[in-house]
Amino acid sequence: MIYREFGSLGWKVSAVGMGCWNIGGQWGEMTDEQAAEIIHAAYDAGVNLFDVAEAYGNPHGTSELRLGRALKDIRDKVYIVSKIGSWGFRQGEMIPKGTVDSIRLCGHAICGRLQTRYVDVVLCHNGSIEDPSVYIAGFNALMEEGFVKAYGISTNSFEVFKRFYDMSEGKCRVLELDYSLINRQPEEELLPFCKEHGVAVLARGPLAQGILSGKFDEKTVFTDDVRKAWSEGGAKRETFLADLAKARTAIETAATIAPELAPAEAAIRYTISHAAAPVAIPGMTSVRQAKQNAACGNKLFTQEELKKF
């Protein structure tokens, strides 16, 4: 596993982290024991950064509870990122965070579920927020209280990110964004800005929720809560088909550049090879997948190879 600086925070983090949305039950049934096995397999394979959120899991908070139990004995050897702001979003009952104290209490609750005295990073989980002042004030309070070491935002909007960064007076040290072979928009503004200003980057969706694995086609039927809208007649069917077409092109290109790599391996390696040093945080639904995804962090594409994509 490659370990490198996480922005300007002075932390050595694994090039591939673990996204923990999957372990909460929204992507299919999973037991506490299965979740723990996957987390431990990822850690044993070199992963030392785990990304979660208060809204991950069915019910919400399940992913944090499972992650906290699994990491309890090795807490000082890993970095944990969590998020505040999307509780109830997928159920159409999003609970607004309107006061500084509401942000503080969410931070305290996250630490409780994770069984930890502090969270390394907390992010605003509202990617379209217009006025983030309450979040920034709440995050600053959590830092002063010792519950949080650093904070930032999860968004793919440069306008939203820049506003958050400016209003925080540069205290925003982490950006999480959607970045993959079929979504390279961050390469235009977000990633260059982060590299220039020492902002750490977390790349969610490096496999585009599995599309870049090469395992899906037009006949695939999805049953999990997150992707069932991709199935025939689903609300996101057209988006899925468009992304599937992009993925096929990307997979074909990757095969000419690195024929020794499986599609998923090439996709993750591409994400972590950008000069801004993003940490890819793919989801992991089995011990085997945890080992395979972690192994993608052993090597980067060269600049010459990247130019061919």
Image (cartoon, grey):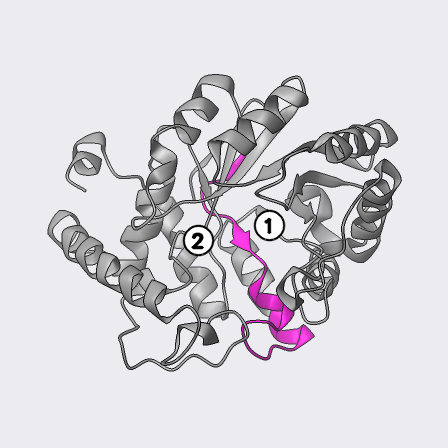
User: Mark 1 to mark 2: distance in Å?
Assistant: 12 Å
Circle count: 2
Q: Is residue 10 visible?
A: no
Magenta span contains residue 30: yes
Residue 39 drawn at (x, y percent): 59, 61
> In terms of depth relative to the viewer, which is nearer, 22 or 137?
137
For mark 1, what is the residue? 51
Q: Left of 41 or right of it: where is 191?
A: left
Q: Quadrant of the C terminus?
A: top left
Q: Is residue 208 above or below residue 32?
A: above
Name the residue at 69% across, 38% down.
Answer: 120
Of the numbered discs 1 and 2, the one sitting upstream in the chain is: 1
User: Around disc 1, counting alpha carbons within 10 Å, would you say few (fewer than 14), some (14 to 19), or many (20 or more)?
Assistant: many
* Element under disc 2: loop
Name the residue at 63% across, 35% down.
Answer: 130
Name the residue at 44% across, 53% down.
Answer: 205
Q: Quadrant of residue 173?
A: top right
In the rendering, which numbered label is found on residue 205? 2
First to last magenta residue range: 12-35
> In terms of depth relative to the viewer, which is nearer, 56 or 292?
56
Type of amino acid at the residue the image marks with label 1: Asp
Residue 256 drawn at (x, y percent): 11, 51
Name the residue at 84% across, 53% down.
Answer: 112
| Camera-side mark, 1 or 2 | 2
Type of amino acid at the residue the image marks with label 2: Gly
Q: Is residue 227 visible?
A: yes
